Image (spheres, rainbow, N blue to C red):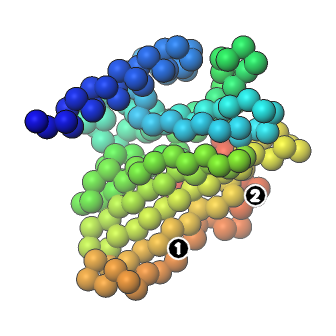
Amino acid sequence: MDMKPLLLTVTFIFLALFYNAQGLKTFIPKGYTLLDSASGDLNKDGIKDLVVVLKNNLEETNPDTARPLLILHGTKTKGYTLAAKNTHVVLCKNCGGIFGDPYERLVVKNNFFSVEHYGGSNWRWTRIITFKYNVNTKQYVLHRDAGISFHTSNPDKTSNVTTNEKTFDKLPFVKYRYE
């Protein structure tokens, strides 16, 4: 018996119940669904926050559509408030080249969160875009934008790739663009 369909169904039911119970539905615009989320105490207030990636429901027919990333701060009443939004952090479904959708996952650790991508064709690449919350300025800033590149014929020979290095710890999350 193939357990994959059952596992997918259970996962979607859990996500639907989770985001409805937590009031997340109010942050998801019409025509979008939840692609991924990760939680942690980003703003160091002792309350769990949430980073959410959304996908356009028309992504299958228009794979270049933006994927909004929302930062939701947890409240004492177990709800959320929108802290920041950016539609230029998560690469589009079509941005991975022949390899396909480059989106890998979200990671939250302490007051940092990262969006991880992997794509390419014969030349493969990774891109990990990390933001941190600055408790003094109370805003999220780009901390690191880097990855590796390699050819599939020689995967052990990698090149480090860093983007936007001059803006590390300065560029606000809301102004970041992956282009």
Q: x, y (%) of residue 26?
A: 54, 15
Check residue 161 in the rendering and tell me which mark sits there, or answer none. 1
Residue under circle 2? 169
Q: Is residue 167 above or below residue 162?
A: above
Q: Which image quarter is the N terminus in?
A: top left
Q: x, y (%) of residue 65?
A: 38, 38
Check residue 9 in the rendering and tell me which mark sits there, or answer none. none
Q: How many marks?
A: 2
- Asked whether disc 2 touches disc 1, contact meaning CB atoms under 8 Å apart, the reply is no
Which quadrant would residue 151 be assigned to in this image?
bottom left
Which quadrant would residue 149 be assigned to in this image?
bottom left
Q: x, y (%) of residue 14?
A: 40, 23
Mark positioned earlier in the residue sequence (2 or 1): 1
> Which residue is pictured at 72% across the width and 46% down the height?
111
Q: What kind of element bears circle 2?
A: loop
Q: Is residue 177 in view?
A: no
> Which residue is pictured at 64% across the width and 29% down the height?
72
> Which residue is pictured at 19% across the width and 36% down the height?
3
Q: x, y (%) of residue 171?
A: 72, 53
Q: What kind of element bears circle 1?
A: strand
Whole-Å distance between the Cαs marked 2 and 1?
18 Å
Q: Is residue 164 in view?
A: yes
- Left or right: 135, with 91 as reference point: right
- Identified by mark 2, the residue type is Asp
